[in-house]
Image (spheres, helix red, strand yellow):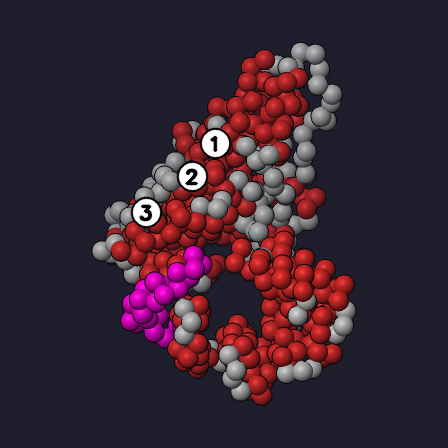
Amino acid sequence: MVRIIPICKSLGLAASALALWSGPAMAAVTDRRPLATYLAARAADAEGQGDAALAGYARLLGEAPGDRAVAAHAYREAVAGGNAALVRRAIAILGKAAPPDAALFPLADAARANDPAAFAKALAGLDSGILRVIAPALQGWLAEARGQDGIALLDTVPKKSLAARFAAENRALLLVARGRVDAGIAAAEAVQGPTGRSPVIRAIAELLVADHPERAAALLDDSALLAQTRASAARPTLAFATSRLLVRLARELDGERGSVIGLAMARAALDCDPTYVPARLALAMQVARSDDPDRALALLDAVPLDGPYGEAALAERFPLLARTDRDAEALALARRRAEAEDADGVDRARYAGLLVQADQAKAALPWYKRMMRDRRFAGNATAWLNYAAGLDAAGDWKGARKALTRALSLSPDDPQILNYLGYGEIEHGGDPVEAIALLERAHRLAGDDASIADSLGWAYHRLGDTARALPLIEGAAAAEPDNAEIAEHLGDLYWAAGRRYEARYAWAAATVTAEPRDMARLARKRAEGL
C-alpha cells in the first residue's frame, strides 16, 4: 500500500520540477488481464494491505507481461515492499514511460557492483527534476573510479546551482579518499561547519574509522556516534558514495508524509549497500510516512536493538507501535529496555511515559525518579515537565507543581511549561491571578497553539468571564476539531451561555475522539446538561 505525495520544498524546487509522473493512463481492464486479480490487487492497495497488493500485481505481470498499467502499480508497490526483482521487471516493461525515480535502481545496481561502465550509463538517466542535483557529485566519483580527476570535475560545477552543495560535500569526501585527510576535513567544515553530526563529517569518519580510528573519534567527539560509525565503516567506492548521497537527500525530503522520490531514494540507497543501517532507517521512515506502518516495523526488525543503531530504531518503533494499536507490545519492549543492564535515562523515561499513557502513573513514578537521578536529566526542563505529568497523573499535584516550578526555572519562556502550570493551578484551586498571568504569557509566546488558547479560555471561564473565554475556545476547537478536551470545554461554555443545542452538539463531537474513561461523563452531559 503506497499513499505518498511528491514533495521537494526542502530543496527550494517547485513540485513540477519532479516532472510528476502518474503512470500510463489506467485504461479499462482488457480481456487479457484477469479482472478479479486486478480488482483484488487494487482493493488490497486501497485498504493498506501492501503485501497482498504486491502479490497480486506480481501475479498479474506474469499473466499480462506487457501491461504497462499493471507495471505502473507493481513498480510503486515493489519499491515500498522491497521486491527488487519486481522493481526491475516493472521498469523494463515501462521503458520510457517509467517514472523519473526509476533511474535510481540501475544506478544502485551498478554502484553495488562497482561497475563504472554501467554506472555511467545509469547516470545518464538522472536527467529530470530533483535527480539532476545529485548527478554532478556522482560524476565526480565516476571519474575517480575510472582513474580520472573527479575533484577537478566537481570544481566546474557552478557555485550558485542547486547541485553545488552536494558537489562541494563530495569534493571533501574525494579529498579524504585520496588520502588528503586534513584538506578534506577543512573542505567539509567549510560547507557544513565542524559539528560531528553533519552528514559529510560523519561520512568522512566512516572512511577513516577502520585505518585511522583516532581521527574519526576526534571528528565525532561522541561515543554513540563513534559506535555507529564503526558499524558503518566503508571504503571509497561507488556504492559508498551513492548510498550516502541518496540517504542524505531522502532525509532532506522527509516530512510528515512520505514522497515517492524520497521512498525510491531510500530503497535505492539500501540496494546500493544492504549493510548501511542509516539507509534502512531512512527507508523505514519514508515507508511509515507513506501510511504503511507494518512494513516500516518489518524494516526496523532487522536493526539489532542492542547494536549501535538500536536507539535510533527504537525511536522510530514506538510511534509505529502506537499507530498500529500495539500498546501492550510497546510497553513490554520499553520495560525490557528500562530493565536492561545498559539502560539509561532515555530508556527509563520512555517506559515511564508509556506507563502513564496506560493509566499506570503510580507505577511510573519510581522510573521517573531514577531518570531524574541521571545528571543529564537533572538540568533538563523537558525531563522535569514529563516528571510533573507523571506526578499529576498519579494524583500528586503538590509534587507536580514543584517539578513544574523547577522546569520553569530552567526554561522560563517555554509555553508548554507555562501552560501546564497555569492550567494546573486553575484546576487544583491555586492562585487564580498567578494562573491567569502564566497562561496569558504562554498565549503571547505561542499564539497559534490551540491547547494553550483553550487553557487560557478555560481559566477565564472558571473565573466567571465566559464572554471573554468563548472566542478563545471556539478558535481552539476550529483549529483542532479532533481534540476531545477542547470540544468538551466548548460544550461547557455554550451551556453556561444558555446555548443548549450547541452545547450538546459540542459534547457529541467530543465523543468521537474521547478516551473510553471519559465517555460516561460526556453521555451524562448530553443527557442532563450541567
Q: Is 270 placed left or right of 473 in the picture? A: left
* Residue 386 seen: no
Query: Which residue is more in the foreground, 74 or 175?
Result: 74
* Label 2 CA crowd tier, 10 Å (few <14, some 14–19, many 20+): many
As helix, strand or loop, the secondary structure at mark 2 comes to helix
**Amino acid type shown at disc 1:** Gly
- Residue 202, percent from left and from top: 38, 53
Q: Is 302 placed left or right of 516 in the picture? A: left
The image's mark for residue 515 is: none
Q: Is 128 placed left or right of 138 in the picture? A: right
Q: Is residue 361 magenta?
A: yes
From the image, tell me which residue sits under label 2. 299
The image's mark for residue 305 is: 3
What residue appears at the point 57 percent right and 23 percent down from the top-left corner?
57
State yes or no: discs 2 and 1 in contact (Cβ < 8 Å). yes
Quadrant placement of the C terminus: bottom right
**Amino acid type shown at disc 2:** Leu
* Residue 46 seen: yes
- Residue 4, percent from left and from top: 61, 41
- Residue 137, percent from left and from top: 50, 44
As helix, strand or loop, the secondary structure at mark 3 comes to loop
* Label 1 CA crowd tier, 10 Å (few <14, some 14–19, many 20+): some
Relative to 273, does residue 182 appear above or below in the rendering?
below
Residue extent of the magenta highlight? 356-384
From the image, tell me which residue sits under label 1. 82
As helix, strand or loop, the secondary structure at mark 1 comes to loop
